[in-house]
Amino acid sequence: MERKEKVTAKQKEKAVKDYLSGKYTLREVAKQYQVHHSNISKWIMLYQNWGEEGLKRPMHNRRYSDEFKEEVVQAYLTNNYSLYDLCRKYKLRNFSVIQSWVTKMQNQGRKL
């Protein structure tokens, strides 16, 4: 059974454009759409990376090679990139994927 999104892609696009226009603060936009301001930040990143398509719910999970994951984790740990910067640089949709890769690699005892 497919989950229904609380906010549609068109609403997300309008929220992003409202914020980027400078008319509203992040918190004002979040209040208008009844979501946490971190959601608006994520929508902005997705919109900047992929345009309108980035705001649509993906149909499937992407798969990444171990080499790609290690590259991202190394960049996170050694180059002082923020999670936001890494998502933009590597075209990732979610901050938490990086955090899970870091945790998984540390739990496996890999030298990072």
Image: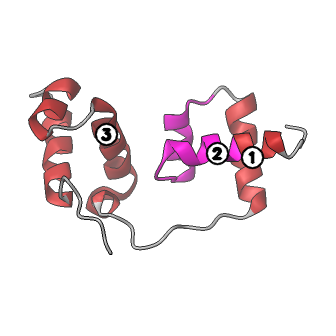
In what element is the residue under mark 3? Answer: helix
Whole-angstrom CA distance, mark 2 to mark 1, is 6 Å
SS for dot 2: helix
Left or right of residue 86: residue 35: left
The amino acid pointed to by label 3 is Asn
Q: Which residue is mark 1?
A: 104
| Total numbered circles | 3
Residue 35 lies in the magenta stretch? no
The image shows residue 33 at horizontal and vertical percentages of: 13, 40
Q: Residue 10 sits in which quadrant? A: bottom left
Q: Which residue occupies 71% across, 57% down?
A: 68
Q: Is residue 21 visible?
A: no
Q: Label 2: few (<14), some or many (≥20) within 10 Å?
A: few
Q: Which mark is residue 39?
A: 3
Q: Which residues are magenta?
A: 81-102
Q: Nearer the viewer, mark 1 or mark 3?
A: 1
- Colour treatment of the image: secondary structure
Q: Residue at x 23, y 59 (%)?
A: 5
Task: Give the residue at mark 2.
Answer: 100
Q: Where is residue 48 drawn, in percent x and y?
A: 35, 48
Place of residue 16 in the rendered image (x, y in percent of width and height, measured from the top left): 21, 43
| Amino acid carrying mark 2 in the image | Ser
Q: Are marks 2 and 1 in contact (CB under 8 Å)?
A: yes
Closer to the N terminus: mark 1 or mark 3?
3
